[in-house]
Image (spheres, rainbow, N blue to C red):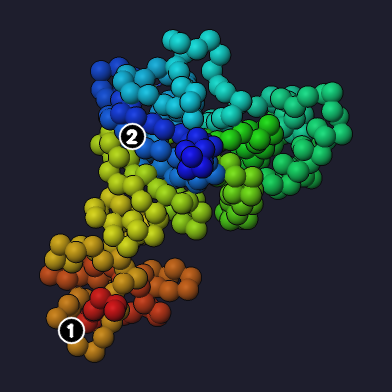
Amino acid sequence: MLLVGLVLLAKMLSVKNLTFSYDTTTVLSDLSFEVDKGEHVSVIGESGSGKSTLLKLLYGEYDLGTGSIHWNTTEILGPKFNLVIGYDFMKYVAQEFDLMPFISVEENVGKHLSNFFPEEKRARTAELLEVVELSSFSKAKVKTLSGGQKQRVALARALAKQPEIILLDEPFSHIDNFKKQSLRRSVFKYLKQKNIACIVATHDKEDVLGYADRMIVLSNNKILASGSPKDLYHNPKTALIASFFGEFNNIDGEIVYANQLETVAHSNLNATVVHSYYKGNFFLIEANRKGQTLFFEHSVALQKGTTVHLQIRK
Ligand code: ADP
Ligand code: MG
């Protein structure tokens, strides 16, 4: 009895056999997955693989070809069946965010909050501006902001009414490297604290590793793989998945990351150094093995033409 109660309480997104095409070419074909309350799921895939389309479908922007989308018992319907797009429990931050340029940052963030509770509204807006690290810009007009700052305002506005699930399309793509790391930590920590489920479309592994509970890989209109970042990193199965995580080699049919190869005194895996790329705390060495390019990581630069013996790190 208790179990049944728990199952009913656990909120979740359920996507079943979703198929969609803009015209005659299929963009997404027969996708099924679920997202639990508070879960952080990354959707990755090459440019054009349908990440943005999927988020828009989840938000109800388009009508599905076939299949269904539910948030608990509420079916998400497209414009054919739903006059107003969007639901209170779900927010969506598009790749191209639309803000009101002539009003201030704080007015944009608080736009959907009630004016009947000015003190609460002020506190809530201030809290969210802190999450997106824009407190000092609260009075600035949005039109005076950079692309990255606007992206942060859009994030804060989507969080204002505390949704149960938020869909983020490349949420840090316009934000410079100086800010990106701390902003990511701040936003993802906030979502976990408030138990807000999130689906993040990205092609940046830094958005995924260390944050996502699960990742879904889109390729050729389908879900190519799904699993924890750790599982997919250690067992990438295909070159596409490995390439998401970093430089890798195909050694006799086995996927081996550049950081899994080390130099040893003797081995059967010989290669000739072609180039050393400075990477900060290591060098990425490009080498040639019987006409095939190999990459491995090394603590110092190696002279071009040097013969190295490599082995897969134990
Ligand atoms: P991603 O976000 O992974 O880069 P998209 O979802 O934007 O991919 O695009 C998936 C495919 O759908 C691409 O081939 C793209 O050209 C096509 N597409 C995207 N939006 C539209 C649209 N409004 N009309 C027609 N085709 C579109
Ligand atoms: Mg996109």
Give the secondary structure at mark 2. strand
- Residue shown at 39% from the left, 54% from the top: 228
| Foreground pick, 167 / 204 | 167
Q: Secondary structure at mark 1?
A: loop
58 relative position to 309: left or right? right
**Is 285 left, or right, of 288 in this rendering?**
right
Instruction: Name the amino acid, label 2.
Output: Ser
User: Residue placed at 44% from the left, 45% from the top?
Assistant: 42
Question: Can the viewer see residue 261?
Answer: yes
The quadrant in which the C terminus is found is: bottom left
Do callouts 1 and 2 mark residues in contact (Cβ within 8 Å)?
Answer: no
List the residue tagged with mark 1: 267
**First in sequence: mark 1 vs mark 2:** 2
Q: Which residue is the extreme one toward the front?
A: 1
Residue type of the residue flagged with mark 1: Ser
The residue pinned by badge 2 equals 32
